[in-house]
Amino acid sequence: MEQKAGFAHLFSREPDLCGKDEYLEKRQNSLADRLKAGSHEAAAELVDIYYEQVYLFMRRLGHSCQVSEDLTQESFLQAWQHVGQLRSGKALNSWLYRIAGNVSKLYWRRHKGSDTVSIEGIDEPDGNEVEYDRIEQDEQLSELKNAVARLPIKLRQAVVLHYMQHLTIAEAAEAAGIREGTFKSRLNRALKALKRQVI
């Protein structure tokens, strides 16, 4: 049972390969500048780059497929309407996730009593592991995803932003619209709750 305690490896990040982070930062800065200048091509590029990420974010927050598509589109519409609030390319991720998070919160407020949808089947791990290990890991991941879906929305959002959307603590805190210390506290409470549910 001890192997279930350390489940962060299931949401692991890939290392920076050949200056990938530097390239992405330059691309984000360029995109942010063009967005602020009102470029429709930049808006289309923003959608091309982030549509799948925002859609998966919505699914991971417990929205159905159709609702996730609608909320993803609403997020990009809101992003275009509030492009003046974008500070720099470095803040592009957290700015967009903050908008998407707010769109999701507004949906939940308007649809109180709606059940969350299981996040089963989203982002199943790939790998060349021995079949037995893969099945065991799939079972653990399935159990963990169900536990994440049962978390209160603020705690679920913390887990999704940091571990599933791969934002840093600073980016995730900004996306959630809270201070880093508050975000770390939520993340800690979420991880404790997940350990109680999964172990």
Image: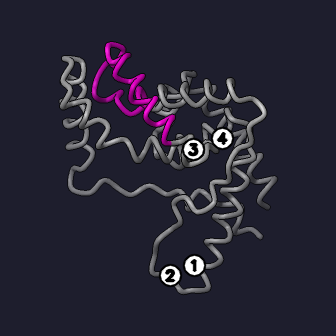
**Image position, residue 177 (x, y; %):** 54, 22
Q: Which mark is residue 160?
A: 3
CA distance separating discs 2 and 4: 29 Å
Q: Quadrant of the C terminus?
A: bottom right
- Eye-nearest disc, 2 or 3: 3
Q: Which residues are magenta?
A: 69-96
**Image position, residue 54 (x, y; %):** 45, 41
State the image quarter where residue 109 is shown.
top right
CA distance separating discs 4 and 1: 25 Å
CA distance separating discs 2 and 3: 25 Å
Query: Is 86 one of the magenta-colored residues?
Result: yes
Q: Which mark is residue 129?
A: 2
Q: Which mark is residue 156?
A: 4
Q: Are marks 2 and 1 in contact (CB under 8 Å)?
A: yes
- Return the disc, 2 or 4, that comes first in the chain's sequence: 2
Given the image, on which type of amino acid does mark 3 rest? Answer: Val
Q: Which mark is residue 134?
A: 1
- Return the disc, 2 or 1, that comes first in the chain's sequence: 2
What residue lies at 56% left-to-right and 47% top-to-bottom? 59
* Residue 28 shown left or right of residue 5 in the figure: left
> Which SS type dominates the magenta stretch?
helix
Q: Which residue is nearer to you in this view: 178 or 188?
A: 178
What residue lies at 58% left-to-right and 31% top-to-bottom? 104
**Image position, residue 186 (x, y; %):** 67, 34
Given the image, on which type of amino acid does mark 1 rest? Answer: Arg
Q: Quadrant of the N terminus?
A: bottom right
Given the image, on which type of amino acid does mark 4 rest? Answer: Arg
- Return the disc, 2 or 3, that comes first in the chain's sequence: 2
Given the image, on which type of amino acid does mark 2 rest? Answer: Glu
Q: Which residue is nearer to you in this view: 185 or 172?
A: 172
| Label 4 SS | helix
